[in-house]
Amino acid sequence: MFLKLVFQNSFLMINPFVDRFNEGGPFMMTLILTCLILSLVFMVIGFRNLKKDPAHSKKMTRLIADVSLLGLVLGFFGSILGMIEAFDAIEGFNDSVNSTMIAGGLKVSFLTILFGCFVFIISRIGILILKGLQKP
């Protein structure tokens, strides 16, 4: 009974994140999520090779920086595409445009920027820790 209750509570907590992921556009959000996963994998490889092979660890640091920047740029690119789609939809409505429609379109377009910034910040924190542990 307790396990079922814990599972239901965790499912309810995850569900808003899944909803936001789908609202932001599954294609662009999946690309940004791939950047997050790649940066986490490169972080793990960098930490594992910290003492055995410092040169490989420094290479992983550069890869983390590149992938995090790619995630951020993909977020901005997805946002621009989302705004273009929102403005195209608004343009098709002629005179019956209200403020909630505009606000909804802008909210959706900013979700990819938010996720891209999240990927960038998490990756940068990992880079700072990795560089702090590397020997000069």
Image (cartoon, rainbow, N blue to C red):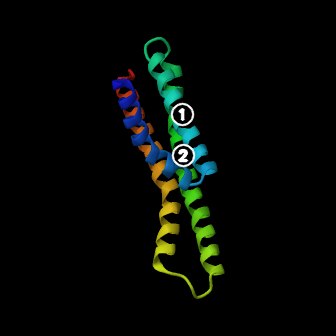
Q: Nearer the viewer, residue 53 or 14?
A: 14
| Residue 102, x across and y down, in percent | 50, 74
**Amino acid at pointer 1:** Ile
Q: Which quadrant would the N terminus be assigned to in this image?
A: top left
Numbered tag placed on residue 53 in the rendering: none
Picture quarter with the C terminus? top left
The percent position of residue 123, horizontal first and vertical second, equals 45, 37
User: In this view of the protein, which residue sits in the foreground, 56 or 108?
Assistant: 108
Picture layout, residue 26 above or below residue 51: below
| Relative image position of residue 4 (x, y in whole percent) | 40, 28
Q: Residues within 10 Å of mark 2 (few under 14, many from 20)?
A: many
Q: Label 2: which residue? A: 71
**Residue visible at 39% across and 23% down in the picture:** 134
Determine whether label 1 and label 2 are within 8 Å by CB: no
Would residue 55 be found to the left or right of residue 136 on screen? right
Q: Can you see residue 66?
A: no
Q: Residue at x 36, y 31 (%)?
A: 5
Q: Secondary structure at mark 1?
A: helix
- Where is residue 127? Give x, y as percent: 42, 33
* Mark 1 surroundings: few (<14), some (14-19) or many (≥20) residues within 10 A: some
Amino acid found under the numbered disc labelled 2:
Gly
Q: Is residue 1 left or right of residue 56?
A: left
Q: Which residue is mark 1?
A: 37
Q: Is residue 125 above or below residue 111?
A: above
Secondary structure state at the residue bearing disc 2: helix
Q: Is residue 77 left or right of residue 17?
A: right
Question: Reading the chain from its start, which is encountered first: label 1 or label 2?
Answer: 1
- Residue 83 placement: quadrant: bottom right
Residue 58 seen: yes
